[in-house]
Image (cartoon, helix red, strand yellow):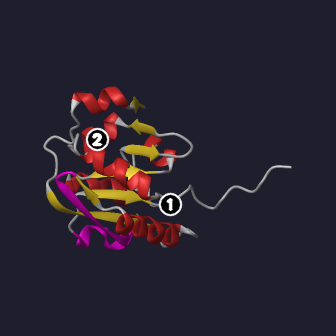
Amino acid sequence: MLAAMPAYAEAFDSKDVTILGEALHFVVPPPKGEISVAVVYNPAVTGSEQEAQQISKAFSDTSQNIGVSMHAFAVSLDDLNHNAFVAVVSANGAGTPILRNALTSHHAVCVTGHLDQVENGSCQIYMTSQPTVDIRLNQDATDAADVHFATAFRIMVRTL
């Protein structure tokens, strides 16, 4: 008998946050100092806000990387454009045109544990550390947001 699938993908843990911090070093130019990371959720999707809260908590456990200090905050899709942020972590159901437009206007990096959001171009990077590290990049989505990654990063990830 098959086990029921969870309502959302495994939320980021401290290992994923560390990997995100390392990935941000490959953005051209890389962010420095203190940066804000919006953890966006869709209030119309069951479990999305809870996933965003769990992800935000993972940042409080591991928010320091070489040259950058990440401060995460959970925010609904409707309020996303009213906030300043350098990067976004997208929870279940947040991969919508609203998110895509916010990324474009902020020239922000978007990471998610939901592959469908990267495949449909709502978010740029799919990332998971479970059971092994898997990072996939949607080049069209990064181009649309005018986000550029160093060649070394593009060599290390799978491009969709």
Identify residue type, mark 1: Gly
Residue at point 38% right, 58% down? 89
Q: Secondary structure at mark 2?
A: helix
Q: Residue drawn 19% across and 56% down?
A: 68
Check disc 1: other Cα within 10 Å, few if <14, some if 14-19, many if 20+: many
Viewer-nearest residue: 106 or 38? 38
Q: x and y percent of residue 134 in the render?
A: 47, 38
Which secondary structure lies at badge 1? loop
Q: Which residue is mark 2?
A: 142
Quadrant of the rendered structure where residue 150 is? top left
What's the residue at 46%, 61% (across, down)? 91
Q: Which mark is residue 93?
A: 1
In this rendering, position of residue 7 left or right of residue 92: right
Say whether residue 2 is left or right of residue 138. Answer: right
- Read off the magenta span: 66-83
The image quarter in which residue 143 lies: top left
Residue 116 image point, x, y percent: 51, 46
Q: Position of residue 49 (x, y in %)?
A: 48, 72
* Circle 2 Cα neighbour tier, 10 Å, few/some/many (<14 / 14–19 / ≥20): many
Residue at the extreme right: 1
Q: Amino acid at mark 2?
A: Thr
* 94 to the left or right of 20: right
Of labels 2 and 1, earlier in sequence is 1
Q: CA distance from mark 2 to mark 1?
A: 20 Å
Give the vertical position of 116 relative to 49 (above or below). above
> What is the total number of numbered labels drawn onto the structure image?
2
Residue 74 belongs to magenta span: yes
For the C terminus, the quadrant is top left
Residue 14 vs residue 135, the one in the foreground: 14
Give above or below for 43 relative to 96.
below
Asked if residue 118 lies in the magenta stretch, the reply is no
Q: Is residue 145 above or below residue 41?
A: above
